[in-house]
Amino acid sequence: MVLRTAKLGCMAAAIAAAFTHTASAQQAPETNAVPAVQDSAPAPADGLNLERVVVTGTASRSTKMRSSVSVSTMDAENIALAAPTSAAEVLRSIPGVRAESSGGEGNANITVRGVPISAGGARYVQMQEDGLPVLQSGDFNFITPDSYVKIDGTLDHLEVVRGGSASTLATNSPGGIINFISKTGEQEGGNIGIQRGLGYDETRYDFDYGGRLDAKTRFFIGGHYRTGEGQRNTGMSTEDGGQIRGNITRELDKGWIRLSFKHLDDKAPTALPVPVRVTNGKVSEIAGIDPRSTTFYSPYWVRDVSLTRENGKVSSNVNDGLRVKSDAFGIAASFDLGSGVTLSENFRKSQNSGRFLGVFPANNGKAGSYTIATGPDKGKAYNGMAFSAVVFNTSIDNADNTLNDVKLSKSFAVEGGKLTATGGLYSSLQKLGLTWNFNEYLMQLTGDKPALLQTASSTPGYVGPAWGGCCMRAVDMEYKLLSPYVNLGWEKGPLNVDASVRQDRQRANGAANIATGGLAYNPAAGQLVDYNIHHTSYSVGGNYQFDRNFAAFARISDGVAFNADRILFGTPLDGSAPININTVRQVEGGVKWRSGGASAFLTLFRAKTDETNFEATTQISTANRYDAKGAELEAAWKLGDFRVNGGVTYTDAEIVGAAPGMEATIGHTPRRQARFTYQIAPSYTWGALTAGGSLIGTSRSWADDASTIEMPAFRVVNAFVRYEITQQLNLSLSVNNLFDKIGYTEVEGDGHAARSIGGRAVKLGLNYSF
């Protein structure tokens, strides 16, 4: 990848010019504020930082101690201790979040406590950057929000809300909101760094810098670039790319305004399931196929020739893996209009595209006598295992979106307390242009530079369209959302109560088509999409702070996640039939406590989910109802230079309803739902040396709703050491999956393939701060 520096330079110059006379990012001061507890002493410091102000999932800024939702924050130091290799791996350190980060640097499956993972991506959780979604739907086929989120020095901190007000303060997010919040130049200075993989080929360069242009204007710019093979064995350079992000903020007398941009152009391998054996419900590895490192990318692939939506042909390099591109421009502002009135605006326009290329095994291999068709041994006999390699080749033609959230708040003094009324209007236009192509090849079953094997085709290894040509699709959709919402919040002394309601109205237009026999698109066979759908969500909660160190909260909520392309080719979508939606109803309550450097956040929850789903790999549609209840504990402790953060989540989930023909699954535990998940991350500083790590684990779970295939429990240890050579220069060593454990996150329903987390990855880094 070549970063378009000239284009970015012009963009940065335009931003700077726009701010010659205006623009900063200081939140307008609130008026009529009521103290949480009548005590003049400052709030104590604690491990969970309960006095930190959060902006995610709230109509107005509130501390974690005062908030009536389950919310976690992670700063840059905690993120470094997790030694993440992707955005999804960061989320594994958050209690209550299930992040199946086994797809490489994208394509992760994410949800929160009690809410199922029954489709790819993040159906019930919205991933945001600076308060606006990355993609409007989190479960588009082959395009997930985490693919467009990269972790580097531009990230200030992370805020994660589970349940609660996420139903009414964002769209398609009844399970929660994950908000990646950027640095804005509040601290003068910057960093440059280089990081090198040890034992594998990956080199990464990072930079960031921020500060003030004048007394009322500040800026920030940063990003990264990396190249190499990556952590899994591909036999060639399959990583190439990075991002650059920046913003400029102008502080006004009563408010601020900010312009921002992002340019992302990145390529990384896609990790899909690999062949395994299942015997008596137990998964075992096939000799030579390591699920931690095998990808089936190889220098001996031929070009994959696929069909365009115009019935033309396009040639792709299978080894390109996941390619994502994004160019975004945003405007955010907040104005104190006086008399307790605040106006806030958040706008972003993004151009998103890319291509998803991965090798999926259609079976787990068959022994035979074959002829090698590619590579240095071309023409030689091969007596061994071969498998059907299906190339998932999906062009992300258009995932552009235009998003806007504007809200007006008014505060009133009411009987010694403060009443804040907030009205907002969220609107979005999300486009979705996808072209699916699934070609099948015959390939050696080996994890070390596999070659294609001869077939009857003139193209080496080529068998034909996979699965009888069922899955060659062209999708050209447009989803418009208009969502008015209202929030009322009242606080007096130690008590605050809030209630909110939101109506999401979605209009879907477009067309979709399946190529006949996988060979050509017939316009007359296309599916017209033209429907309107709406849902009204609500959330009511309260928090009572008994004293400076103890508070309790409770909340009830109802939310929706609208279906997108996963309902194509099923129920008519031209407005002549009802449209299925996915709803989540939740009740939760808990306590927050601290004493000295110790703190804890305990939440009891119950979630009921009604959903419909379609799986691309099985071609099966489902309609299930789920009921889950449990407890989530997040805790931390600081003592001098030692600190430890951790959490545990217990979930008792059950399928309580199913579509006709699937009734046998009722009473079973939902697939991939472990009863226990847990995290613990200690660290200690000895002068110039800081050492830490994390242990992330899960109990066993079932791979299928029928509870026939067991996914074993696993634990992953990550480690981190940093040494300050000087006050500005430090050397770091991080290890992900220190003990090189296999951890299965999904198994195909018939047991022929499974996907695991990646193996051990060691990185050495050098960073200079200035």
Image (cartoon, rainbow, N blue to C red):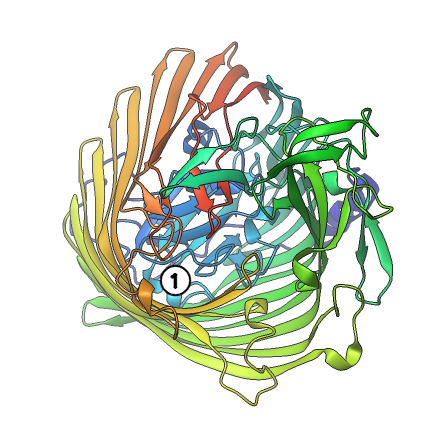
Q: Horizontally, is 627 left or right of 333 in the view?
A: left
Q: Secondary structure at mark 1?
A: helix
Across and down, in percent, residue 575 comes to 57, 87
Q: Categorize mark 1 by other alpha carbons within 10 Å: few (<14), some (14-19), many (20+).
A: many
Across and down, in percent, residue 573 comes to 59, 81
Front-lying residue, 271 or 242? 271
Across and down, in percent, residue 373 comes to 81, 35
Front-lying residue, 417 or 582? 582
Q: Horizontally, is 60 left or right of 181 in the view?
A: left
For the point 66% across and 72% down, the residue is 478
For the point 29% across and 44% down, the residue is 51
Front-lying residue, 215 or 368? 368
Q: Which residue is mark 1?
A: 166
Vertical order, 400 against 1 (above or below): below
Query: Residue farthest to the front?
Result: 369
Front-lying residue, 467 or 326? 467
Vertical order, 182 against 588 (above or below): above
Figure disc tally: 1
